[in-house]
Amino acid sequence: MLGGIASGPDDVLPGPDRVGSALRSARRSRRLTLAQVADGVGLTKGYLSKVERGLAAPSVGTLIKLCEILEVPVGSLFDGGATGAVVRADAYPQVRFGGTGLAEFLLTPAGERRMQVLLSEIEPGGGSGDEAYELPADVSFVLVQRGTLHLAFPPERSVDLGEGDALTFDPGAPHTFRAGPDGARVLWVMAPALPAGDRSSVR
């Protein structure tokens, strides 16, 4: 059985949360203040402090901006994945990649660079947040296993996917996603895997 799902912008997802501490370590190693980083991404200093302490869940777009300003590879957020080729259903490694009302699990082994597979359990109305984001991969594939998912590609295009529907798209195009009124269980595939860079700098 998969773990519980956060339901609000300040909820903390279950399981170990290393994202906030990784961002804090990266900020300190670059000798940047909370105020400098917060100003750079358009956040308040107080909210950024809560993110670093694991008390707030930023949107996917905000998390990517934080990675950019701190020069932290996006893929480094997925450290701690499975080490073998077999990932058992009762032992999915949980990762945190921003957004609200969702829990995400990495299904591909740590170190697999050819592709990356994530499973998202999304509460009704949960998703990436209102801010559109881009990912540094060549292609993305999404399959809705349960519920409905709304994908928006601002300013003009949007797609509604139901159970069993799939979509292949360019992850470099700004986009957002949101689950429908019954929530959603979604499988994401990205190729190649998001760049991890020097993993020794993020723990």
Image: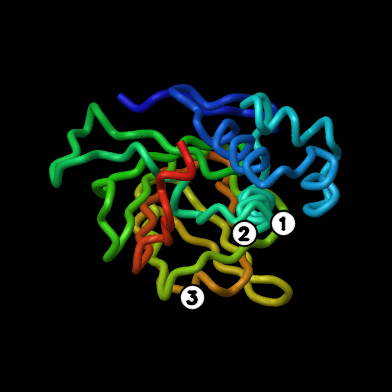
Ranked by sequence position, the earlier of labels 1 and 3 is: 1
Pinpoint residue 27: horizontal percent, then vertical percent: 67, 42
Q: What residue is rendered at 49% in x and 75% in y?
A: 170
- Along the line of sight, the residue nearer the viewer: 21 or 185: 21
Label 1 to label 3: alpha-carbon separation: 17 Å
Tell me where residue 134 sits by quadrant.
Answer: bottom right
Tell me where residue 38 sits by quadrant.
Answer: top right
Residue receiving disc 2: 176
- Could you classify mark 1 by the number of other residues whose Cα lies within 10 Å: few (under 14), some (14-19), or many (20 or more)? some
Q: What residue is rendered at 72% in x and 53% in y?
A: 130
Ranked by sequence position, the earlier of labels 1 and 2 is: 1
Query: Do tag 1 and tag 2 residues touch (Cβ < 8 Å)?
Result: yes
Query: Do tag 1 and tag 3 residues touch (Cβ < 8 Å)?
Result: no
Residue receiving disc 3: 170
Q: Is residue 120 left or right of residue 129?
A: left
Ranked by sequence position, the earlier of labels 3 and 2 is: 3
- The three-letter amino acid code for the residue at tag 3 is Asp
Label 3 to label 2: alpha-carbon separation: 13 Å
Q: Is residue 16 left or right of residue 174?
A: left
Residue receiving disc 1: 131
- Along the line of sight, the residue nearer the viewer: 190 or 23: 23
**Kind of element beneath mark 3:** loop
- Could you classify mark 2 by the number of other residues whose Cα lies within 10 Å: few (under 14), some (14-19), or many (20 or more)? many
- The three-letter amino acid code for the residue at tag 2 is Thr
- Could you classify mark 3 by the number of other residues whose Cα lies within 10 Å: few (under 14), some (14-19), or many (20 or more)? some
Label 1 to label 2: alpha-carbon separation: 7 Å
- The three-letter amino acid code for the residue at tag 1 is Glu
Q: What residue is rendered at 27% in x and 65% in y?
A: 114
**Kind of element beneath mark 2:** strand
